[in-house]
């Protein structure tokens, strides 16, 4: 090898190991809900706001969010972006086609849920549009079960 | 605050690819600065190294840098956030009375050695966002940009104008990485969309860079330089990670950090008293958004401010006269470079981008998704 002062190397001990994360009771409840096509959130005992996906702790109140609530399947598209690239493992590549990503409000007290929005020309997207959850045909309690949102 | 801390000198460099190693960059910056000041490493009482383990690809990323930084068998510690936090840490150490001088050195080689976007990709929630694979640094910034424009009814053209001003300033700055001349708003508008409304030239470029800075107590500073720049105030604040729970069109954490810094500095009316600001706006829309949070621009008046030239080098409140982070964003060093750029202005050494009256400056740094954590310094001469 013609080594030079400025050559790059990739370490022979690479960073390719696995971390294991416990997902905890709240995320488990969220994914369990998916098996019945339900979207679950957790409500704060202080401010009454709902986090979706559910979470145990409310940052604003520093209190436990101790109530699970089922959210409606329909909501409002509050904000969106049209993606022209895909970002994977730090690399930016052009997208095959422009696609919509939206922030959806399912309940006036609930946090916004980021989701793909389909069945709509990205150029036609407007904040305030009504959208509904679209599930995979087979749901199995996986993150991908709630596939996307579509115009209601 | 009681006691005074000054910035007595700095060295910085950035480029798309510096063709260097972490160690060599650290040595050239810190040894160069010691030589500039005519002192040796034993004159530095404490060294703060600012780098990121994840981006460095090794834990304890300062482990090999004590030698090049001159910190061998000396008091040394580390910061792994934006460089403005490292400056605050250095000030606190000097104000404790235990140290008369503090060296801060920050570096990020995210132009040549690792993708800058991984930094946020691996900061996402492991048991949600990294499973759904929807959220990333660029699309969250785009969501923030869209809701900010919508809040005031601004058109996307404003982003082009902001970026054109920043890139025009950066082209004239010898320390910037992205120096492209002749880029006006039409050229910005012709660059490709990443995520609407953000285009390539609205976003920071992957950058290699670093900065070393020496801070000192008042007495020591007066021995080391004829041009001390005083740290008059400092503040920082953090808000939630969850973008679905944030008002992305505002930055309450920046507002709170600035309020604390202004209170320390005795600045009562920042819009009138601050002469220039170096803001870590990683995306075009963040410059007015963060400037509003710091009381430097009137809310809802960004279009007027940019079109009238108020924010230009010759304007009423020059924002990023260096070109800011659109001219280069080496993670960790980025905010420290904003501080160094403010120092150049306050010393009257900013060359073609020198603003007229430069007595009070603000420098800002950020970390996280959509500027989750913000740190603000008020500097003066």
Image (cartoon, coloured by chain):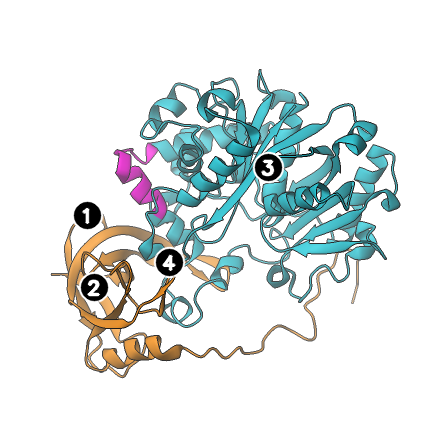
Q: Residue at x 25, y 34 (%)?
A: B153
Q: Give the drawing colour for chain B.
A: cyan
Q: Which residues are magenta?
A: B144-157
Q: Residue at x 45, y 24 (%)?
A: B269
Q: Tell me how far mark 4 sits from mark 2, CA to CA.
A: 20 Å
Mark positioned earlier in the residue sequence (1 or 2): 1
Residue A121 visible to the viewer: no
Q: Chain of mark 4?
A: B
Q: Are marks 2 and 3 in contact (CB under 8 Å)?
A: no
Which is the main secondary structure of the residues drawn in magenta? helix
Task: Say whether residue B255 is magenta.
Answer: no
- Residue designated by label 2: A149
Q: Is residue B38 above or below residue B354?
A: below
Task: Say whether residue B148 is magenta.
Answer: yes
- Between disc 4 and disc 2, the foreground one is 4
Tag 4 secondary structure = loop
Q: Position of residue B217 (x, y in %)?
A: 75, 35
- Residue designated by label 3: B338
Q: Tell me how far mark 1 sits from mark 3, CA to CA.
A: 37 Å
Disc 1 packing (10 Å; few <14; some 14–19; many ≥20):
few
Front-most of B133 and B361? Answer: B361
Disc 2 packing (10 Å; few <14; some 14–19; many ≥20):
many
Residue B342's quadrant in the figure?
top right
- Residue designated by label 1: A126
Q: Which chain is orange?
A: A
- Between disc 1 and disc 4, the foreground one is 4
The N terminus of chain B lies in quadrant: top right
- Between disc 1 and disc 3, the foreground one is 3
């Amino acid at each position: 090898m013609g080594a030079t002062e400025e050559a790059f190397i990739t370490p022979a001990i690479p960073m390719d190991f696995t971390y294991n994360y416990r997902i905890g009771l709240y995320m488990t409840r969220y994914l369990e809900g998916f098996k019945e096509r339900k979207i679950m959130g957790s409500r704060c005992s202080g401010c009454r706001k709902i986090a979706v996906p559910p979470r145990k702790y409310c940052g604003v109140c520093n209190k436990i969010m101790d109530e699970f609530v089922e959210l409606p399947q329909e909501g409002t598209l509050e904000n969106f972006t049209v993606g022209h690239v895909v970002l994977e493992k730090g690399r930016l590549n052009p997208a095959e086609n422009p696609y919509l990503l939206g922030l959806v409000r399912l309940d006036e007290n609930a946090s916004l849920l980021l989701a793909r929005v389909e069945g709509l020309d990205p150029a036609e997207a407007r904040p305030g549009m009504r959208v509904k959850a679209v599930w995979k045909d087979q749901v199995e309690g996986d993150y991908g079960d709630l596939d996307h949102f579509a115009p209601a | 605050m009681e006691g005074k801390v000054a910035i007595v000198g700095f060295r910085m460099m950035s480029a798309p690819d510096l063709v260097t190693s972490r160690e060599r960059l650290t040595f050239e910056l810190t040894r160069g600065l010691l030589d500039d000041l005519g002192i040796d490493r034993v004159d530095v009482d404490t060294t703060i190294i600012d780098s990121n383990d994840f981006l460095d690809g090794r834990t304890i990323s300062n482990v090999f840098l004590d030698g090049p930084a001159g910190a061998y068998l000396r008091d040394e510690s580390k910061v792994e956030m934006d460089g403005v936090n490292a400056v605050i840490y250095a000030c606190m150490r000097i104000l404790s009375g235990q140290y008369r001088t503090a060296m801060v050195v920050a570096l990020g080689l995210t132009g040549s050695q690792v993708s800058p976007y991984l930094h946020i990709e691996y900061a996402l929630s492991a048991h949600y966002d990294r499973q759904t694979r929807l959220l990333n640094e660029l699309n969250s910034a785009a969501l923030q940009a869209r809701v900010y424009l919508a809040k005031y009814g601004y058109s996307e053209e404003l982003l082009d104008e902001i970026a054109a001003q920043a890139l025009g300033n950066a082209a004239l700055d010898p320390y910037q990485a992205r120096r492209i001349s002749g880029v006006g708003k039409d050229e910005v508008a012709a660059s490709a969309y990443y995520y609407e409304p953000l285009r390539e030239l609205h976003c920071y470029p992957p950058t290699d860079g670093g900065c070393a800075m020496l801070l000192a107590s008042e007495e020591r500073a007066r021995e080391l330089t004829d041009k001390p720049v005083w740290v008059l105030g400092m503040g920082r604040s953090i808000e939630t990670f969850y973008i679905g729970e944030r008002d992305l069109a505002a930055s309450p954490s920046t507002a709170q950090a600035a309020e604390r810094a202004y209170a320390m500095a005795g600045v009562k009316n920042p819009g009138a008293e601050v002469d220039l600001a170096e803001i870590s706006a990683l995306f075009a829309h963040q410059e007015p958004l963060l400037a509003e949070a710091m009381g430097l621009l009137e809310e809802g008046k960004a279009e007027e401010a940019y079109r009238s030239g108020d924010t230009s080098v010759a304007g009423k409140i020059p924002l990023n006269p260096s070109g800011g982070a659109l001219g280069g964003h080496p993670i960790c060093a980025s905010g420290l470079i904003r501080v160094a750029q403010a120092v150049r202005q306050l010393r009257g050494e900013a060359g073609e981008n020198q603003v007229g009256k430069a007595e009070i400056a603000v420098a800002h740094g950020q970390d996280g998704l959509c500027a989750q954590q913000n740190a603000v310094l008020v500097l003066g001469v």
